[in-house]
Image (cartoon, rainbow, N blue to C red):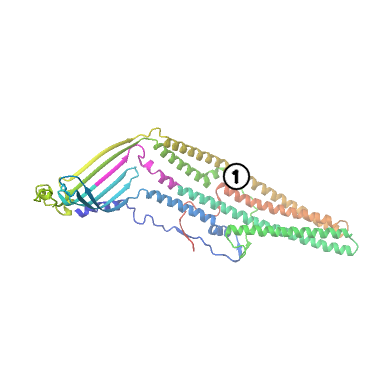
Amino acid sequence: MIKLFALLPALVLLWFMPASGAAQLGSDTVEIQLEKKAIEGNLPLTLNGAVELALERNPNLVVEKIRVEQARGKIEEEKGNYDPVFNLRGSVSRKDNVVASRFYPTGLYVDSERAQGIGLQSRFYTGARFGIDLDFKRLASSSNTQTLSPQYAAIFALTLTQPLLRDFGTGVNTTRLRVASLGEPIAERNLTLRTSQLIQQVEEGYWSLWYLRQEYDVRRKSFEIARELLRRSEDLFRSGRLAAVGVLEARSGVAAREEALIVAEREFNKFEDRLKLLLQLDPGKANISLVDQPNKTDIALDSAKSVERALKQRPEIEALNLELEQRDLEQKFAANQTLPRLDFTVQYGMNGISGRPNQTCVDPTLSICIPVGNNVEGSIFKGERRPKDAFDKFFTHNPFDNWSVELKLQIPLWNRTANAQLSEANLRVSDAKVRLRSARDQIETEVRDAVRETTSAKKRMEAALETIKFVEDQLEGSRRKFEAGLGSSYEVLQVIDDLEKARSNENRAVLDYNVGQSKLRLAEGSVLENFNIELKKTPRYIFRDQ
C-alpha cells in the first residue's frame, strides 16, 4: 500500500499523458526533397505538364509548405504549455550551529540532513494550477532539543489554485492555443494562394513563350519575303527595269528585318529562361518545346457572377476571416486581463515522523549522561524507528495532516498596462476588419479588370484576322504591280510591314485572351478547380535535404 501511495505522482502523470501515437504522422504524409534532380535534354511540354513541374519543383511552394508545418508545430507548442511537469529532487546539507548556552559547553551542535522528493505540477484549461509533492527527509542532530536522531520525516502535499476573475475559464486560458489552431488553416489558405499564383504565372509564361515563338516566325517570314524581294529587285535592275534606288530600298528592308529577327530571337530566349526558372529547370541543359496551342474559342463572361464567386472562393478572403477570428480571441483575452485577480487556493498535507532515540545528553554539564531520547518510549513515537514507519502515519486513523483554504484578491491600481494592451487589441481587430473590406474591394476590381481584358482581347483577335486577310490581298496586288514595273520596292516593303504588324496584333490578342482567362480564374479563385487540384486539407510534410 505504501509503495502504491509513493507512486501516486507517477500515476497522475500517466493520467495526463497524451494517447499513444497522438503525435504520429498519418498515412497522408508527403515527403519533399529540398534538392531537386536536374532534368536534361529536350522536353516536350504541355501546359498541364508545366504546371505539374512547377508544383513539384518550385521553391516558393516549398517555403509555403514549410510555413504550414511551422503553424502545426505552433499548435503542439501551445498544447505543451499544459503538459504536466514531473520533478525529482535530492539534497544533502550540514550545518554547524554556534550557540552561547550553558547546555552547550562546546558552543556547538551539528545538524545534517539528506532529502529526496518527487512531485508533479500541471495546468488545466480552466486556469487552475495543480501540484502534488512527496518528500522524505533524514535529519541527524547533536542537539539536546531533538528527541529523535536520526529522524525520518515523510511529507505529502496537494495544492490547487483556481483563478476566479482574471485568467478564469477555458475561453481565456486557451486563447493562444485557439489562435495557433487558426494559424494552420491560414497557412493552408496562403499555400492555396501561392499555388494559384504560381499556376497563373506558369500559364502566362507558357503562352508568352508561345507568342514569342510566333513573333519569331512572323519576323522570319518577313525577313524571307524581304530577301526574295531583294533578289527580284536585283534581277529587275540588271534587266534595266528598275532603278538603283529600288535595290537600295530592298537591301535596307532586308537589314531592318534581320535586326527585328535577332531581337525576336533574343526575347524568345529570355522568356524561355524565365519559364525554366518557374519550373526549376537548368537553362543550359533543358530545351523546352511547347506542345499545346492557345484557346481561341468563345467563353461565357459575367462580371457579376465572377465577383460573387470570387468573394466565396478566394483564399485571401478565407485567410482574412480566420485572422479576424484570431484578433477577436486576442481582444477577449485582453479584456479579461483588465479584471482584478481573485485566486482560490486549497492546500492539504500529511506528515509522518519516525526515528531512533537521540543519544545526546540532556545536560552535558552533568557527570551522568541522560540521553534526550529516553522519553521516546512514553511518547507517540514509541516503536517507530524505521523510515517505513514515517509513511505508515499516512494510513492511520489519526494522521498528522494539515489543510488550508485561501482567497486572495489583487487589484492593480490604474491598471495602465492591461488597459493599453486592450486598446491595442481593439485596434488590431479594427485593422483586420479594414483589411478584409479592402481585400473585397480589390478582388472585385481584379475580377472586372480580367473580364474586360479577356473581352477586349477576343474582339481584337477577331479584328486582327480581318486585317490579315485584307493585307494579304494587298500584298499580292503590290507584288504584281512591282513585277509589272508599276510599283516600287518601297511600296512592297510597306505592305510587308503592315502584314507583319497585323499578324503580330493577332498573336498578341491570342496571348492576351489566354492570359486574361488565367487572370480571371485567379481573380475568381478557380485556378485549382480548373486543373483538378484539391488543397482543402493539406497533408503532413516531411522535408529531406537529399
Given the image, on which type of amino acid does mark 1 rest? Glu
Tell me if I can see residue 393 in this picture. yes
Relative placement, left or right, of 348 versus 192 is: left
Whether residue 267 is in magenta: the answer is no
Q: Nearer the viewer, residue 53 or 422?
A: 422
Which percent across, then down, holds residue 226? 79, 60
Q: Residue at x 80, y 54 (%)?
A: 495
Q: Is residue 483 above or below residue 403?
A: below
Give the class, few, some or many, for how many residues have Cα within 10 Å of label 1's Cα (few <14, many ≥20).
Answer: some
Inspect the magenta stretch and tell me whether residue 167 lies in it. yes
The region drawn magenta spans 157-182
- Please say if 168 is above or below 154: above
Residue 56 is left or right of residue 495, and the answer is: left
x%, y% of residue 282? 59, 63
Residue 47 visible in image = no
Q: State the residue position of label 1.
A: 446
